[in-house]
Every structure is written in structure tokens, then in C-alpha cells.
Amino acid sequence: MATLHTRSAARLMIAPSVLLLLAWMIVPLALTIYFSLLRYNLLMPGMEEFAGLSNYTYFLTDPAFFQAIFNTLAIVLGVLFITVAGGIGLALLLDQQMFGQGIVRILVIAPFLIMPTVAALVWKNMFMNPVNGLFAWLAKLLGLQPFDFLANAPLLSIILIVAWQWLPFATLILLTALQSLDEEQKEAAQMDGAGAWSRFIYLVLPHLSRAITVVILIQTIFLLSVFAEILVTTNGGPGTQSTNLTFLVYAQALLQFDVGGASAGGIIAVILANIVAFFLMRMIGKTLEA
Amino acid sequence: MARNVSTGRKLITTVVAWTIAILIFFPILWTFLTSFKTEAQAIASPPVFLFFDWTTENYSEVQSRSDYLKHFMNSVVVSFGSTLLGLLIAIPSAWAMAFAPTKRTKDVLMWMLSTKMMPPVGVLVPMYLMFRNWGLLDTRTGLVIVLTLINLPIIIWMLYTYFKEIPGEILEAARMDGASLAKEIIYVLTPMAIPGIASTLLLNIILAWNEAFWTLNLSAAKAAPLTAFIASYSSPEGLFYAKLSAASTMAIAPILILGWFSQKQLVRGLTFGAVK
């Protein structure tokens, strides 16, 4: 009787979250799918009509779409490469004995806590600006021509800004994983005559592999949706050179008011994210067993 | 732990680590310094580092020109509001799943997490239209609702992993001693759950404070939190580095401090307990 009572109480306690998340998941997504099948522009209210898959064909044949897919992947892969490689290096460094380790950690973590619009604007204006930026000053100091980062290499600049924000995340997680490595194991390897490099390859890296996978998957989820950094730096330009899928859908919806087209793009983004999510969920699911 | 390294090696590590850490931190330091310069000094070439006429006029200017405090309060209301509302909904759920798990608990948890995987842009259009129709565009209420929903899975997950660590034997012992469910919750569980709840609160305030997709798309002049307000500096009118820096410094300082206190929880919360 007691357990039955507890069980129904438990169900009652879980219900609000489940219902809310169910509504949050189903209602807007169903609407997006519905809109994606309509010819629907906010500038022409009352003119909605069924359009079949034409929004999808429009989106999939738009040259901007392929550029956006390319840019999305470039941002994800570029940032992943920098943050994972840099994160491993930094985590190894921070794991060493040093003076003022706590402060060093605090300094390294900081960029992750900065809101994206601030991070992007600070980099854009105070560092990458070709006239007043610090990089321009450094270039002149070295006798070089100042480089207009956001005009000439917009995608790379955005990758650098986003990588700066996410490097602390990778570092922090890898450092946490590193600290759980058994000290005795390392000592044993050392006594067996394993050099620093082979200890790294055969002991540390395998130990980190799980954390690295987690970093890659979680960052990918967020990096597929980079938005604010693009909005405040390049606005997707010049042209569509730094437009990713998220930004393309935003532009289609809120700048061109094309509800149908934007919805089709949104659904494509959902499919893309689901492929990644599938692997992430399996990873996290395994930890529940433990 | 007791691995001793030579002082020489420790010194070298210290120098290298500090150099890299300062380089990584430099943009933030530079923003902070620039916020105390005049606009002319902010773009001076060669740049001035410490020896300039420190002034706080940028801070008062930012406030008087654009009612900074209003946006700051929007951020406070939206991030605290959504976090507290989220906790209110999540605590009972996480509690039930941790202490009265069923066969389906794991599936429910995984499903909740999967809602977090949905890219926001996939539901941007309907959310925008619904908000427009219901008069929620550019309101704090609207932002609180959206941020509660997007962070709810993380809140539930974090709480669940913390609650899970509370030993079940304690509950049994209390029950044996004849404690009622209410007493059990108030005297036994709550004290043990508070640290986990506090960590969850902290991390989610940080996440909500920095959220920059929905706040940018669903707010304008009235309800814009700092993320959206700072974005308005992307279209410059004249010289504005010092003012941008002052506005930025005030926007990031509270969260930097909170974040530094919750380093550990950051890892746990952001990996959904997969790395502790």
C-alpha cells in the first residue's frame, strides 16, 4: 500500500516537467513542420496556401544553403579542432605543480563565462578592427600591413572568437578527467621506464578518450547553433560568407519574413542536430548504467 | 598527490602557465582597463595600458544615455526568474526519479535531455509567431517562459545526479524511527539536498544570463536583457570603445564572480553528469 501510494505521488511529482517539456517539444516543432509546407510570408497575410515540398526544394537549391552548410561545418570542425587540441595541452599543463594554480585556473575559465555578444564585440572592435584594433597596432609594430579580419577572413575570425569562448570548457572537462587518473598508475609506468611521450600516448590519452568524446559531442550541439557571434560581428557577410544554417534561417524568417522557407530550413537544422544527438545520447545513457 | 617535482621545474611550469593564462584572459582585462579610459585614449596608438587618466565617466554615461540599469534588471529578472521557476518544477521531478525510480525513469530522463538537443532555430518561427499573437514579444514574462523551458532539462538532470548521491539508507533509518514523509523531507533530505540545489541554481543563472539566441530574437527595447542590449553596440556611431567596455564590464562582472565560485558544478552540469 505504501509503495503504491509513493508511486502515484512520484508520478504526480514528475508530471509537470514531463507535460511542459512534451508541449515544448511537440507544439512548436509540429508548427514548424506545418509551416514548412505552406507558402507563407508575413508581408502577405491571408495569402497562405499549401505548397507541398516547394519550400524544401527552394531551400535545397539555394546556393546560400550550401554555403551555409559548409560554414556550419567549418565552424563546428574548426572550433572543435582548436579547443580539443588546445584543451588537452592546457589541461596537461594545469595538472602540473605550479605556484598560484588556483588563479591560473580562474583566468583560463573566464572566457567561458562571458556572454557571447560581449565576447564577439570586444574581439571585433578592440582586437580585429583594422584601424583601432590591437592586432592592427601589432602588425604595424612588426612593419606589416594591418589585416581586416572580419572583411577578409570572416569565417576564420568567427571561428577564432568562438574557439576562445569554448577553449575553457574543453580544458575544464579534460582537466577534471585528468585529475581522476590514478597517480600510482603513472608512477608505475614511470618506473617501468616509460617516457613522457609514451605515458601520454598509452596511459593518459586512453584515459581521456571518454572525456574527449563528451567534449566533442556537447560542443557540437552548441556549435551547430552559433548565432550571436555572427549577428554582432559580420551579420552573416560579406555576402553569405559567414552565414551558417542558424543564421540563414533567422535571416529568412525575421528579415525576409518568409515563414515557409525559414521553417523548411529549421527542419533541416533539426535533422542535422539529431544525427549528432543520437551519438551523444548513447554516450550519456551509458553513464546512467553506472 | 605526494609526487614531488624539483623547484626548477615548478618555476618553469609556473611561468609558462601564467603566460598562457594571462594571454587567454587578456581580452577581458583589456575590456576592464578600457572602460576607465576616455574614448580618445581607448583608441590611442600606441595603446596605453595602465598609465592613463582613470575615469569612471563611461559608466555614468552608459547609464544616462541608454538606461543601463533597466537592461541590467531585465537580465536579473529573466535569469533569476527562469531559474527559480525551473527549480520549482524540477525539484519534485528529480526527487521522485531519484528516490522512487521505476523501470521507465531512465527513459524519461533521456527523453528530457533529448529536448535540449533541438536546435533553437528549428522552432524559431512558431515561437516568434506565437509570442507575437499572445503579446509576449519583448516582455520579461515571455523570456522567463522560454528560458525556463530550455534550461529545465539541465536543471532536472543536475538535481537528479545530486539527489542520487544521497544515501538511501538514511531514509530507511529515518522511516524506521517512525518519521513521516513530511518529516523525512524537512529534516533528513532537505539539508542533504541543499548543496546540490544551490549548485544547480548557480549554474543555471549563469546559463540564463548569457543566453543569446532567444533573448536576441524575442526582445527589443523594452525587455532586452544585457545580451541584447550589448548587441546594439554592433552598429557604432562614432567613438564608443570605452563605453562598450564599461557596458560590457558591468554585464560580465557578476557572472564571472559566480562562475569562479562554481567551477566544479560547471563541469558536472554541462556534461549532464557524464564527467564529474
Image: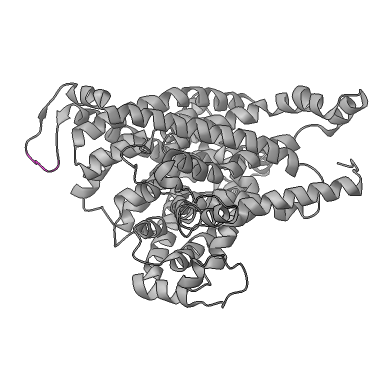
Evaluate whether residue B195 shows in this view: no
In front: B116, or A197?
Answer: A197
Assess whether residue A235 is covered by the magenta stretch.
Answer: no
Quarter of image, res B50 = bottom right
Return the residue found at the far front. Answer: A143
Residue A98 visible within the image: yes
Residue A233 in the image: above or below residue B158: below
Whole-percent x and y of residue B83? 46, 52
Q: In what quadrant of the picture does the C terminus of chain A appear? A: top right
Most foreground residue, A200 or B95: A200
Q: Nearer the viewer, residue A147 or B63?
A: A147
Q: Which residues are magenta?
A: A42-46
Determine the residue positioned at 50% across, 68% down.
Answer: B42
Drawn side of residue B142 relative to residue A284, left or right: left
User: Is residue A163 depicted above or below B142 in this figure?
Assistant: above
What is the x, y in percent for residue A133? 50, 57
Q: Left of A43 or right of it: where is A180? A: right
Q: Main secondary structure of the magenta part?
A: loop
Depth order, front residue of B130/A19 = B130
The x and y percentages for residue B137 are 26, 53
Residue at the image position 25 percent from the left and 23 percent from the top: A61
Q: Position of residue B194 (x, y in %)?
A: 60, 51
Identity of the residue drawn at 64% across and 27% down: A210
- Residue A44 forms part of the magenta stretch: yes
* Up-down relation of residue B174 to residue A27 (above or below): below
